Amino acid sequence: MAASYATTTQLAQRVARGETWTDTESAVLTQLLADVSRLVDAYTRRRFWKTDAGVVRYFTATGSATLFIDDATAITKVETDGDGDRTYERNWASTDYDLLPYNAAEVSQPFTRLRVTPRGNESFPAGVPKGVKLTGTWGWPEVPDLVREIVLLEAARLWSQGRSPSGVVASPELGTFVIEPQLHPQAMARLNVLRRVMIR
């Protein structure tokens, strides 16, 4: 299940320390964090939360030696279908492929591709739709500090724009209008370092 990248306690400390929050206000804070987290996902084309283990995803290989995948923290099973019948006859050994980048886990980064090992016995079925079946844990090992900070800043900004459950801001001068969650250009610029270039 998709997760928020910061907590309501962290956000409450940013927007008004020491205040007592009503249940409605806490619900608004929770929703703001979830909304901004999903905006970050959409902009970066990544998901920084982890799935459960054992989740199956399918991929179409564009080459026989390298397969670009969604961000993953672990891949536990690789199966391939060479003729398009979706039976996945080939069950790869762990010695048949490497997860790249090699040292991703040590720096809390995800794996983003698989490569056939030099002495591996398998190859990816290039061009076969859904020809590769992967089982694993998807997402990032940890939420990056930059992502958490952006989510808190953006949620605090939205909170300050309209402190009401409906997200409506009203004033005699401006009238009434609704705040639509969206990322600030500065936030997007900071997130560019994490934005994924789509290969497939």
Image: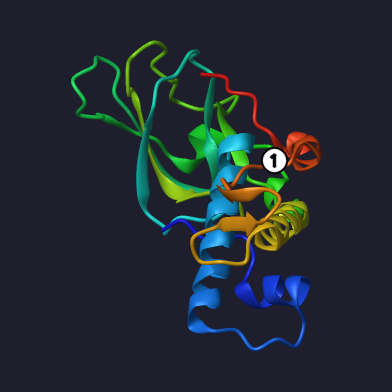
| Quadrant location, the N terminus | bottom left
Q: Nearer the viewer, residue 88 or 148?
A: 148
148 versus 75 height, above or below: below
Q: Quadrant of residue 60?
A: top left
Q: Quadrant of residue 79?
A: top left
Task: Where is residue 84? Give x, y as percent.
Answer: 24, 16
Task: Where is residue 146? Give x, y as percent.
Answer: 77, 52
Q: Residue at x 49, y 77 (%)?
A: 24
178 versus 7 height, above or below: above
Q: Nearer the viewer, residue 56 or 191?
A: 191
Q: Nearer the viewer, residue 25 or 60?
A: 25
Q: Which residue is mark 1?
A: 102
Q: Is residue 172 left or right of residue 65?
A: right
Q: Residue at x 51, y 27 (%)?
A: 120
Q: Residue flagged by tag 1: what amino acid is it?
A: Tyr
Q: Is residue 193 left or right of residue 112?
A: right
Q: Quadrant of residue 115?
A: top right
The answer to whether any part of residue 48 appears in the image is no
Q: Is residue 112 left or right of residue 51?
A: right
**For the view shown, which residue lies furthest in the front direction?**
172
Q: Check disc 1 and report its element: helix, strand or loop.
A: loop
Q: Residue at x 56, y 38 (%)?
A: 42
Task: Where is residue 121? Give x, y as percent.
Answer: 45, 25
Colour option used: rainbow
Q: Residues within 10 Å of mark 1 (few under 14, many from 20)?
A: few
